[in-house]
Image: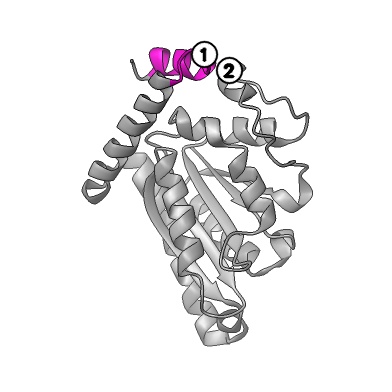
């Protein structure tokens, strides 16, 4: 059982989001998971060129670190996406990474894995970023276990920091529990089924242009 965290902060693990991810990771380890943290600040992930070659062949034309990160995600049971709030959205590092993941979404490659979200912010405005990242997890087929959002001011206060870190620790343990039990979240079933059917419809429609994605669907989910 493996939990992968992808953090999009330009500060890597030294920022607010990193401290929360560390706490989630420690709790997941204590619950029996193997963990890995991937810092996009330390990786070379270039912007998507919109060429759709990934949909045609399954391989991206860009030679950088994205392929190894994608492989780690596909091998994981749990996935944590973490980003600071930059202009009411994820960081540029995280957005570039997610843009490169369109084929993961089309093919529902993360179906039935378990996801969680971490958002940090200078102030208390993080709902838009949280909603976006949670939606991305759904669009890729993941069950959403939960999220932890915190303002840097909270982390500067000893009492509030302890509460945030306790929520992070609880989330790490909760994710491992969900993975072990293969938990189903009834309130998410309808949304995930709708997304699954929509992805199937899109891939079927473009089957001539996107042969890799169509063959992936045939072999994994049936079309």
Q: Which mark is residue 56?
A: 2
Do residues under tags 1 and 2 come within 8 Å of each other at their CB atoms? yes
Q: Residue at x 23, y 43 (%)?
A: 190
**First to last magenta residue range:** 206-220
Q: Is residue 209 magenta?
A: yes
* Relative depth, front residue between 72 and 97: 97
Q: CA distance from mark 1 to mark 2?
A: 5 Å
Left or right, 57 with respect to 66, comes to: left
* Relative depth, front residue between 166 and 65: 65
Q: Which mark is residue 17?
A: none
| Image quarter in which the C terminus is found | top left
Count neighbours of disc 1 (C-alpha within 10 A) and say few if under 14, some if 14 to 19, many if 20 or more: some
Q: Is residue 52 magenta?
A: no
Count neighbours of disc 2 (C-alpha within 10 A) and say few if under 14, some if 14 to 19, many if 20 or more: some
Q: Position of residue 103 (x, y in %)?
A: 53, 30
Q: Position of residue 212 (x, y in %)?
A: 53, 15
* Relative depth, front residue between 130 and 12: 130
Whether residue 31 is visible: no
Q: Position of residue 94 (x, y in %)?
A: 63, 52
The residue wearing badge 1 is 211
């Amino acid at each position: 059982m493996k939990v992968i965290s992808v953090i999009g902060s330009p500060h890597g693990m030294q920022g607010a989001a990193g401290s929360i991810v560390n706490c989630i990771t420690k709790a997941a380890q204590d619950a029996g998971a193997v963990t890995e943290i991937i810092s996009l600040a330390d990786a070379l992930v270039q912007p998507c060129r919109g060429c759709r070659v990934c949909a045609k062949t399954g391989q991206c034309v860009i030679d950088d670190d994205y392929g190894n990160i994608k492989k780690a995600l596909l091998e994981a049971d749990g996935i944590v996406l973490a980003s600071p709030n930059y202009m009411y959205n994820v960081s540029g590092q995280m957005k570039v990474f997610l843009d490169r993941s369109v084929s993961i979404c089309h093919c529902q490659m993360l179906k039935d894995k378990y996801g969680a979200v971490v958002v940090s912010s200078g102030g208390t405005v993080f709902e838009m970023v949280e909603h976006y990242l949670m939606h991305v997890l759904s669009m890729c087929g993941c069950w959403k276990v939960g999220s932890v959002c915190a303002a840097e001011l909270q982390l500067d206060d000893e009492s509030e920091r302890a509460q945030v870190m306790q929520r992070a620790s609880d989330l790490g343990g909760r994710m491992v529990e969900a993975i072990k039990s293969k938990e189903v979240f009834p309130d998410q079933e309808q949304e995930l089924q709708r997304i699954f059917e929509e992805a199937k419809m899109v891939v079927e429609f473009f089957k001539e242009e996107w042969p890799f994605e169509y063959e992936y669907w045939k072999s994994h989910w049936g079309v």
